[in-house]
Amino acid sequence: MPPWGAALVLLLAALALLGLLAPRLRRPGGRAVGDGTLPGTRGQDDDHFGNGREPLPGGCRLICKPSALAQCLLRALRRSAALEPGPRSWLCGPHLQTLCHFVLPVGPGPELAREYLQLADDGLVALDWVVGPCARGRRVTNAGSLTPVLLVIPNAWGRLTRNVLGLCLLALERGYYPVIFHRRGHHGCPLVNPRLQPFGDPSDLKEAVTYIRFRHPAAPLFVVSEGSGSALLLSYLGECGSSSYVTGAACISPVLRCREWFEAGLPWPYERGFLLHQKIALSRYATALEDTVDTSKLFRSRSLREFEETLFCHTKSFPISWDTYWDHNDPLRDVDEAAVPVLCICSADDPVCGPPDHFLPTELFHSNPYFFLLLSRCGGHCGFLRQEPLPAWSHEVILEYFRALTEFFRTEERMKGLSRHRASFLGGRRRWGTLQKREVSPSSSLEEIFSWKRSYTRFPAWLGWRQQYEKESTKS
């Protein structure tokens, strides 16, 4: 066991003990652990979400702007068996849901085929393609079409949790091709240059998505993010807009108001746990980072904000202020430019994010037709667990949501094609001599419906270094 292993084991044991004793330690009428760090009172969320909500099975609510897509999603969720209330289990507490997700070992996971992608600045990110095991009763999600690709973005701390692997296994069984994105220096990905990825900088993800599209040019691409990793996904969708290549996206327990989240701080067990995990992950690169950051101050940080500020703001080469950092990394800075349906699954008892009336910008879901909020009564942070061997119900809902999106797009495409055919027929009768047959492309129809225009301006440059990377891999 490494020298820090004993300290990590003791911390995890303390977290587990806290989760078991939290219901007994809470006074009647008191707040949960997650509420103590954020101002406001519990019990006001019913009034806060009173308008524009739709009740669903299991006490969940769908909050969104009325639209045809919202009605389609609402019908799909009302038919979902995953939202049906099951027998009450010992996993119903928010702390147990969260701790089981982050602390318990992942167990036998899927078979992964790792691929390192060299970036434009010679950095490396890793893509773990899920290649097995394939279940016997594997379902086909899109019969008669290409296998959709499911890109999974873990949390910002780089920990690969059991729920992420469970989602990949379930998606593989349902006919998807899952791939996990790992940032620089995360989960065994080498840090070849002293540059880490800031909290909401999607530049590395852009190159990874471009490469995935190069490998699967005609396959639909869906994206799922977990916890703090949602900042990366939302930043990507906002910056790329209608050229994101993504068909649909989902966020599990997203951190939406990130700056306030860092400044308010987490309950101390989670704050210390996440901070310790980051210090352990970066300790192996302490020597390489000495030229860019003050590593002694970095590893003496006592909060997530101090750690983030030291790592990305107080650099030796180009220091910036905390305000400037969030001007470039706030995941909602370009949210009005997002043109992809996004489903956010959140819990009202989330002990990491806090009460929903503080960490959820409800005006976003009431005004933007692309964003949907599924709010549940319980589930913790990224938990949403059920009794074994059932997977987390959030995974079932996400895959059903993607299937509803696919059916909705296919229906809209068919209706658009029929209207075009009718207009062409009537116009041809008036202009019989100038009639020219035009074949309607499904992709062009879909782009016209949602005003999606793909951008390939950077692809030739990327293809050049990709080919160079393949030659180097062949030589090695």
Image (cartoon, helix red, strand yellow):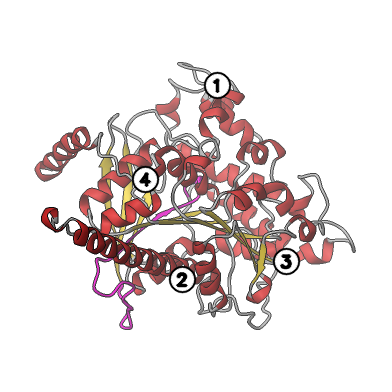
Q: Nearer the viewer, residue 145 or 345?
A: 145
Residue appearing at x 58%, y 33% in the figure: 307
**Marks 3 and 4: which is nearer the front?**
4
> Which residues are drawn in magenta?
133-158
Q: Position of residue 474 (x, y in %)?
A: 11, 45
- Amino acid type of the residue that numbered disc 1 sits on in the rendered structure: His
Q: Looking at the picture, does residue 96 appear above or below residue 205? A: below
Is residue 221 toward the left or the right of residue 60 in the image? Answer: left
Residue appearing at x 17%, y 59% in the figure: 439
Residue appearing at x 69%, y 45% in the figure: 266
**Marks 2 and 3: which is nearer the front?**
2
Is residue 474 toward the left or the right of residue 269 in the image? Answer: left
Query: What label sits on residue 314 in the rendered view?
Result: 1
**Marks 4 and 1: which is nearer the front?**
4
Is residue 109 toward the left or the right of residue 219 in the image? Answer: right
Residue 374: name its quadrant: bottom right
Residue appearing at x 27%, y 43% in the figure: 117
* Gap between marks 3 and 1 measured at Cα: 39 Å
- Amino acid type of the residue that numbered disc 3 sits on in the rendered structure: Leu
Q: Is residue 300 visible?
A: no
Residue tagged 2: 400
* Gap between marks 2 and 4 measured at Cα: 22 Å
Residue tagged 4: 244
